[in-house]
Image (cartoon, rainbow, N blue to C red):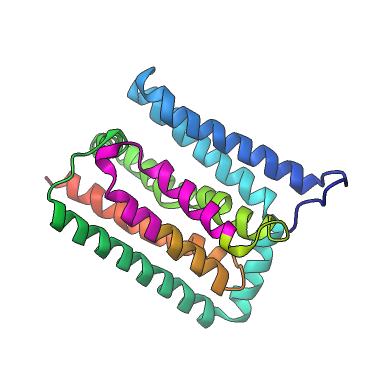
């Protein structure tokens, strides 16, 4: 899907994309501002509800792209699986580079973003429903939302308006900056830039099939979150 050309009335999907991006900006503002204003329970509850709602709405807005991607997966499942595995391999490289940086500079003091994640993980281990909710949000709903925002829109919806190198920049930098919220977390930028590059390459080499980077993101986040939950539970 391409956005309407300049001077033409916006299509239904173009209006849906605008609403989707507006809601995502609202989610981002909530995550940046509200943590210091409300209780942890309210903060996490609103954040999780927004991620779930955005994933559902975004799946509807980009339903044609999703159906096209699924047809391609059904037609060539081996090729799609190969691109997913390649994406996971690139994620492993990004993680290894981050580990090398940590080894060089020593221990990293967690910033506000990482501290909030650790606190939510710890709180979720006391309740199975909370653990499953966290796993669902971090391992499924958030990856869907982020891949639609940072891959489908710049590389797909804006394909006729943005050259691929510029789309790469607009995909990588905001994705990385939103995950690194303080100076002391700067080494994490190595991992998140590498992750954004991996997701973008997976999207482009798979004939712009949004299901491929979504699968990479879901598998990486899902397995990592499940491992952390189990680690915290058995401490």
Q: Residue at x 51, y 63 (%)?
A: 200
Main SS of the magenta segment? helix
Percent of width and height locating residue 111: 26, 36
The C terminus: image quadrant: top left
Percent of width and height locating residue 191: 33, 56
Q: Which residues are magenta?
A: 166-194
Most foreground residue, 20 or 33: 33
Percent of width and height locating residue 217: 44, 59
Name the image quarter holding residue 130. top left
Most foreground residue, 233 or 113: 113
Question: On the rendered structure, is 25 left or right of 128?
Answer: right
Name the image quarter holding residue 233. top left
Vertical relation: 75 (above or below) 100 = below
The N terminus: image quadrant: bottom right
Vertical relation: 204 (above or below) 17 = below
Vertical relation: 199 (above or below) 233 = below
Percent of width and height locating residue 69: 63, 67
Q: Residue at x 68, y 55 (%)?
A: 158
Most foreground residue, 115 or 128: 115
Q: Residue at x 61, y 68 (%)?
A: 208
């Amino acid at each position: 899907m391409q956005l309407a050309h300049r001077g033409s009335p916006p299509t239904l999907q173009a209006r849906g994309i605008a609403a989707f991006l507006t809601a995502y900006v609202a989610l981002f503002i909530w995550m940046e501002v509200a943590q210091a204003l409300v209780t942890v329970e309210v903060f996490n509850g609103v954040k999780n509800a927004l991620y779930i709602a955005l994933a559902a709405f975004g799946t509807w807005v980009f339903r044609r792209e999703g159906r096209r991607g699924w047809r391609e997966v059904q037609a060539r499942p081996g090729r799609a699986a190969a691109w997913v595995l390649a994406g996971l391999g690139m994620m492993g490289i990004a993680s290894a580079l981050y580990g090398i940086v940590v080894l060089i500079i020593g221990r990293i003091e967690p910033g506000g973003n990482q501290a909030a994640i650790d606190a939510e993980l710890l709180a979720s281990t006391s309740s199975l429903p909370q653990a499953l909710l966290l796993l669902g949000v971090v391992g499924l709903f958030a990856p869907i939302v982020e891949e639609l925002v940072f891959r489908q829109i710049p590389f797909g919806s804006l394909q006729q308006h943005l050259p691929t190198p510029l789309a790469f920049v607009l995909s990588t930098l905001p994705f990385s900056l939103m995950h690194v919220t303080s100076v002391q977390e700067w080494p994490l930028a190595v991992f998140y830039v590498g992750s954004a590059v991996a997701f973008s390459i997976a999207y482009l080499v798979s004939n712009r099939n949004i299901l491929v980077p979504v699968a990479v993101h879901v598998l990486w986040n899902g397995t990592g979150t499940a491992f952390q939950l189990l680690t915290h539970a058995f401490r």
